[in-house]
Image: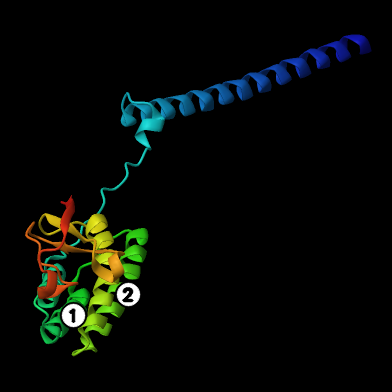
């Protein structure tokens, strides 16, 4: 009799265990199916393209700046020096200094802001030297030489308001040479002035 009771209890226990396992398995299966359905829905929303193509961020186009006013004062400066006019050169240099705060830099990336700030600081420093040295045209021309290299980088990296020509003078500074920028191919040398006004050759067009 005891043997029969124990047998019945064992059978009942096995039945309950089997039922519990079936419920757990069913619950796990339903959860897995729900997860798969969710994944299928997400993939459908993403489209047929591979995931790595979906999350790729395209590089932003290089932002240009409106340098029209700034560059016009630079050309004012070079024309003044080509005419040996140190006082008018002061006016051009002051115009450069006044133009920088007006340039909108909001669209620049962090890297562009850093580069622009460095060029602005260097150009402004040389413009201040030119503005402060009326009557010392040789000194003004020395700073134009340095400034022109910075303007070249500025226009190359941030855009030009119009086609610009890089013109090289091989005779300036004991024949070490120097270049300036112009919106015309016509040579009017700001380093040698009226002494050798047409000395120079176009090396590059920037646009």
Task: Tell me where residue 150 appears, x and y as whole percent.
Answer: 28, 66
Residue 16 located left or right of residue 117: right
Q: Which of the labelled discs sits on residue 93, or is there none?
A: 1
Whether residues under marks 2 and 1 lie with C-beta atoms below 8 angstroms apart, the answer is: no
User: Which residue ends up furthest to the right in the rendered image?
Assistant: 2
> Considering the image in quadrants, where does the N terminus appear?
top right
SS under mark 1: helix
Q: In which quarter of the view is residue 42 placed?
A: top left
Task: Tell me where residue 43 appears, x and y as whole percent.
Answer: 37, 28
Task: Tell me where residue 66 appears, x and y as whole percent.
Answer: 15, 63
Note whether 153 is above or below 44 in the view shown: below
SS under mark 2: helix
Residue under pointer 2 = 121
Note whether 126 is above or below 3 in the view shown: below
User: Which residue is painted at 12% across and 59% down in the image?
Assistant: 161
User: Which residue is painted at 32% across and 60% down in the image?
Assistant: 112
User: Which residue is painted at 36% across and 65% down in the image?
Assistant: 114
Residue 119 located left or right of residue 71: right
């Amino acid at each position: 009799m005891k043997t029969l009771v124990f047998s019945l209890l064992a059978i009942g226990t096995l039945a309950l265990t089997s039922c519990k396992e079936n419920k757990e398995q069913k619950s796990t299966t339903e959860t897995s199916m729900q997860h798969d359905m969710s994944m299928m829905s997400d993939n459908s929303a993403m489209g047929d393209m591979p995931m790595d193509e979906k999350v790729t961020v395209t590089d932003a186009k290089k932002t240009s700046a409106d340098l029209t006013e700034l560059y016009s004062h630079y050309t004012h400066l070079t024309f003044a020096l080509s005419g040996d006019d140190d006082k008018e050169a002061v006016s051009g240099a002051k115009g450069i200094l006044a133009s920088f705060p007006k340039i909108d830099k909001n669209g620049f990336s962090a890297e562009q802001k850093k580069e622009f700030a460095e060029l602005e600081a260097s150009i402004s420093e040389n413009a201040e030297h030119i503005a402060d040295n009326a009557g010392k045209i040789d000194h003004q021309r020395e700073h134009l030489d340095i400034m022109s290299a910075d303007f070249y980088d500025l226009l190359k990296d941030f855009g030009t308001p119009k086609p610009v020509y890089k013109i090289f003078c091989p005779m300036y500074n004991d024949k070490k040479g120097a270049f300036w920028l112009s919106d015309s191919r016509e040579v009017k040398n700001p380093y040698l002035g009226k002494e050798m006004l047409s000395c120079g050759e176009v090396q590059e067009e920037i646009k």
